[in-house]
Amino acid sequence: MRFVIQRVQHASCEVEGNITGEIGKGFLVLIGVSDTDTKEIADKMVKKLLGLRIFEDQDGKTNLSLDQVGGSLLLISQFTLYADCKKGNRPSFTKAGKPDLANDIYEYIIDQCAHTIPNVQRGIFGADMKISLLNDGPFTILLDSDEICA
């Protein structure tokens, strides 16, 4: 499982001209699921995500977590995080999770995050989404379950 986490001042997801999710201060998280991922792996990734202390405290140090600053989440499924570009110029996506598994885990992650964060917004699984954001910093972090769960 891979999360690309961007600390944002605001972010939104649009599908067919309709906003499906919109947040102010918080994290935009792109979520990639592989066929070997499980809910147990998702639990570890969510724990790490929600515990990240990358918001500034009163001294300007990145020392505060999402819940400590009243931040929100915009969670977007993105199978392209498992693009394999080793051969040729056209990426292969065979390492990405099958749609049923990936959607199940995506929905599970949304539910788990909502236990801690009051405002969890989302994209639409499998849809052509238009994502807008203002990255704050810029601050972008990659979490990979191969490292987090090792």
Image (cartoon, rainbow, N blue to C red):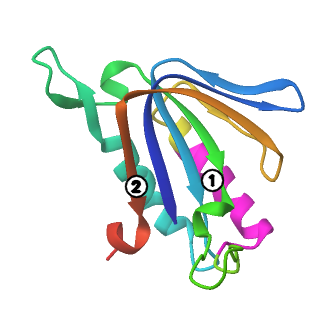
Label 1: state its secondary structure.
Answer: helix
Q: Residue at x 35, y 52 (%)?
A: 48
Q: Residue at x 79, y 67 (%)?
A: 100
For discs 2 and 1, the disc positioned in front in the rendered view: 2
Q: Nearer the viewer, residue 122 or 41?
A: 122
Query: Where does label 2 land, which residue?
Result: 142
Label 2: state its secondary structure.
Answer: strand
In this view, which residue lies farthest toward the top?
58
Q: Nearer the viewer, residue 128 or 101?
A: 128
Magenta span dominant secondary structure: helix
Q: Give, as a three-letter code, the residue at label 2.
A: Leu
Q: Residue at x 47, y 67 (%)?
A: 41
How packed is label 2: few (under 14 Cα within 10 Å), some, or many (20 or more)? few
In this view, which residue lies farthest toward the bottom?
87
Residue 32 figure quarter: bottom right
Task: Give the image location of residue 140, x and y in percent.
Answer: 39, 43
Q: Nearer the viewer, residue 45 or 147?
A: 147
Mark-to-mark CA distance, 2 and 1: 20 Å
Query: Where does label 1 land, which residue?
Result: 108
Residue 57 figure quarter: top left
Q: Give, as a three-letter code, the residue at label 1.
A: Tyr
Task: Give the image location of residue 35, x and y in percent.
Answer: 64, 78
Tell whether position 67 is magenta.
Answer: no
Q: Residue at x 14, y 27 (%)?
A: 61
- Tally of numbered tags: 2
Q: Is residue 47 above or below residue 57?
A: below
How packed is label 1: few (under 14 Cα within 10 Å), some, or many (20 or more)? some
In this view, which residue lies farthest toward the front?
89
Instruction: Decide which of tag 2 and tag 1 comes sooner along the chain.
Output: 1
Stretch in magenta: 96-112
